[in-house]
């Protein structure tokens, strides 16, 4: 009897978003082991007294998780994934089309109207397969996807006007949702301890890209008395510690870090390179924001922010 939901997540942000979907059914979680500290992340949920899942599984790839779910598809009335884009992925989802397939926001890619470039022989061949499978060129565009869950459904409707699927809002804003996820208390205990040492202090936080952008230095010099924090990108290969008082573990979500800092600090100077996650941070008088990096990405971020502001 189909009386359960299956959730597939490939990174911590998706986990947080998956916990923002109203669902009264029994829930099974499928974690894809392709992010730093995955085992500790999983174990902290399993061991928590607040664990909301009936069962938790770990797989190397999303495709392997879906194959496993296919063998037990009689259990599931709903399948939740961060994306339905990709030829193999859509074939596997087709085998689950008797269940309700739901896509939920995973970040910037969820609002991109063309995930696959439209130029080149190889891309044209892939696009042909997309059309044969009944799929649009965006996340949520698969013929058999039923619902799309987002923080900004109106923004998605503007960016992807071809989509005719029902667009659902998450139950809560990002910060409110994060504060209700108690099963990650132990996982974030280290960062919570660190943040508590910054209570009532003035903090300078740089969220880096793939490498350190020297543009942050001139801004940093304006705040010489502030505690300097670096949150490196997870894919940064080399981290220089000469300019910072503290370096935050790269696998800590930037959104989580900022939300937790805002709870305790007196002032937060936030420097980033158009990080899409910062669109989910509520306005706060404590924040002084600087956006650095390439002009095209800065403008893209600001255009998104303006669109969100205009449609609220």
Image: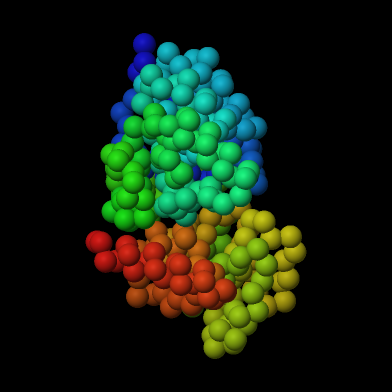
Q: Quadrant of residue 148?
A: top left
Q: Is residue 236 above or below residue 91?
A: below
Camera sees residue 298: yes
- 168 or 175, which lies in front? 168
| Residue closest to the far top | 1
Residue at figure coordinates x 39%, y 68% from the top left:
303
Q: Quadrant of the N terminus?
A: top left
Residue 211 lies left or right of residue 200; in this view the side is: right
Q: Position of residue 263 (x, y in %)?
A: 40, 64
- 270 or 113, which lies in front? 113
Residue at figure coordinates x 44%, y 63% from the top left:
278
Residue at figure coordinates x 43%, y 78% from the top left:
288
Residue at figure coordinates x 59%, y 45% from the top left:
123
Camera sees residue 15: no
Q: Is residue 8 above or below residue 114?
A: above
Q: Position of residue 3 (x, y in %)?
A: 35, 18
């Amino acid at each position: 009897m189909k009386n359960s939901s299956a959730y597939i997540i490939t990174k911590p942000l998706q986990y947080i978003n998956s916990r923002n979907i109203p669902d009264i059914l029994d829930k099974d979680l499928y974690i894809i082991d392709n992010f730093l500290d995955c085992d500790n992340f999983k174990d902290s949920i399993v061991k928590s007294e607040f664990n909301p899942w009936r069962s938790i599984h770990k797989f190397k790839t999303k495709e392997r998780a879906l194959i496993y779910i296919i063998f037990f598809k009689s259990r599931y009335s709903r399948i939740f994934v961060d994306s339905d884009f990709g030829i193999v992925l859509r074939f596997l989802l087709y085998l689950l089309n008797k269940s309700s397939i739901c896509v939920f926001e995973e970040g910037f890619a969820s609002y991109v109207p063309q995930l696959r470039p439209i130029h080149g022989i190889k891309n044209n061949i892939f696009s042909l397969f997309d059309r044969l499978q009944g799929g649009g060129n965006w996340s949520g565009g698969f013929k058999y996807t039923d619902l799309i869950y987002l923080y900004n459904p109106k923004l998605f409707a503007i960016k992807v006007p071809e989509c005719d699927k029902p667009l659902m809002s998450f139950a809560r804003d990002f910060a409110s949702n994060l504060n209700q996820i108690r099963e990650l208390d132990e996982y974030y205990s280290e960062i919570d301890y660190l943040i508590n040492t910054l209570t009532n202090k003035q903090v300078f936080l740089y969220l880096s890209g793939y490498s350190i952008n020297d543009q942050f230095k001139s801004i940093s010099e304006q705040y010489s008395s502030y505690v300097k924090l670096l949150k490196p990108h997870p894919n940064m290969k080399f981290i220089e510690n000469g300019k910072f008082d503290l370096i935050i573990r790269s696998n800590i979500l930037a959104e989580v870090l900022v939300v937790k800092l805002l709870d305790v600090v007196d002032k937060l100077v936030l420097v980033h390179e158009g990080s899409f996650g910062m669109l989910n941070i509520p306005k706060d008088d404590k924040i002084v924001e600087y956006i650095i990096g390439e002009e095209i990405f800065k403008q893209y971020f600001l255009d998104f922010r303006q669109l969100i502001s205009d449609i609220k």
